[in-house]
């Protein structure tokens, strides 16, 4: 009869609405997909670094798009964008160990996001990018010193040199190459002299970084701007 038909229709609508709601809250990213994404990001980062390390001398610059986008080969023993933790080998070792511990924590958190919290795909992708960036720089510091000779301003590094690598385990330098000097102010005002270089000029954007650094930066900005509701 009509009453039974209306009841069945109502039940169907409720089930359909529940299905739609469950689709919005359930992630489409599983452990396998997240792992594949992290590996792909790592491969891109490492391929670019190896190409630079094996083909460019320290300080060499290749202009990709005018002066504002360059491949500029530098190495740093510290954080992203050339920042360092203290001086000497102890600072480098502490930083490398910190990266490893932090990466383990991020890896566990990604597993928790997927399997317990059922987080949206965007959140999982953001943290996968952060983990890939951290692992990319860990590989540099852990392995590059063992398998490469020292890069200099006159010679390209040698892969698996007979005399051994230039540094011990966890003491290698991170390869940086992305340089975007978008514009330069030749003479800074006196009240901004603290920002100027030795010649009195100031360049935006002066830090040299790598693809792993950009993964972390882009992921953090993305999570803050577009996924902040999930953390409220």
Image (tube, rainbow, N blue to C red):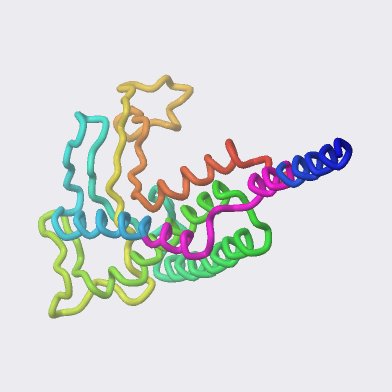
Q: Is residue 45 left or right of residue 67?
A: right
Quarter of the image that includes the N terminus: top right
Q: Residue lying farthest front?
A: 1
Identify the residue at image location x=16%, y=70%. Answer: 159
Q: Position of residue 51 (x, y in %)?
A: 19, 56
In the displayed structure, 116 sits above or below 147; it is: above
In the displayed structure, 67 sits above or below 20; it is: above
Q: Position of residue 105 (x, y in %)?
A: 58, 66
* Res. 133 image quadrant: bottom left
Q: Position of residue 68 (x, y in %)?
A: 26, 30
Q: Nearer the viewer, residue 213 or 40?
A: 40
Magenta span: chief secondary structure: helix
* Res. 43 image quadrant: bottom left
- Magenta-drawn stretch contains 117: no
Q: Nearer the viewer, residue 31 or 194?
A: 31
Q: Residue lying farthest left?
A: 154
Q: Position of residue 19 (x, y in %)?
A: 69, 47
Q: Nearer the viewer, residue 17 or 73?
A: 17
Query: Over which residues does the magenta segment extend?
Result: 17-39
Quarter of the image that includes the C terminus: top right
Identify the residue at image location x=16%, y=41%. Answer: 62
Q: Nearer the viewer, residue 186 or 23?
A: 23
Identify the residue at image location x=61%, y=41%. Answer: 227
Q: Is residue 88 left or right of residue 16?
A: left
Marks counted in the figure total 0
């Amino acid at each position: 009869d009509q009453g039974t038909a209306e009841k069945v229709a109502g039940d169907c609508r409720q089930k359909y609405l529940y299905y739609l709601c469950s689709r919005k809250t359930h992630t489409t990213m599983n452990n396998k997909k997240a792992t594949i994404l992290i590996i792909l990001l790592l491969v891109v980062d490492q391929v670019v670094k190896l190409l630079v390390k094996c083909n460019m001398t320290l300080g060499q610059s290749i202009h990709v798009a005018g002066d504002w986008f360059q491949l500029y080969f530098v190495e740093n023993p510290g954080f992203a964008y050339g920042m360092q933790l203290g001086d000497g080998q102890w600072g480098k070792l502490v930083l490398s160990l910190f990266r490893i511990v932090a990466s383990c924590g991020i890896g566990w958190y990604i597993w928790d996001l997927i399997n317990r919290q059922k987080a949206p795909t965007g959140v999982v992708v953001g943290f996968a990018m952060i983990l890939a960036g951290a692992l990319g720089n860990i590989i540099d510091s852990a392995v590059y010193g063992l398998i490469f000779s020292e890069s200099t301003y006159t010679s390209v590094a040698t892969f698996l040199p007979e005399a051994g690598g230039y540094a011990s385990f966890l003491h290698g330098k991170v390869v940086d190459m992305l340089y975007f000097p978008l514009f330069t102010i030749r003479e800074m005002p006196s009240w901004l002299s603290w920002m100027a270089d030795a010649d009195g000029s100031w360049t935006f954007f002066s830090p040299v970084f790598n693809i792993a650094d950009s993964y972390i930066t882009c992921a953090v900005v993305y999570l803050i701007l577009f996924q902040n509701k999930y953390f409220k």
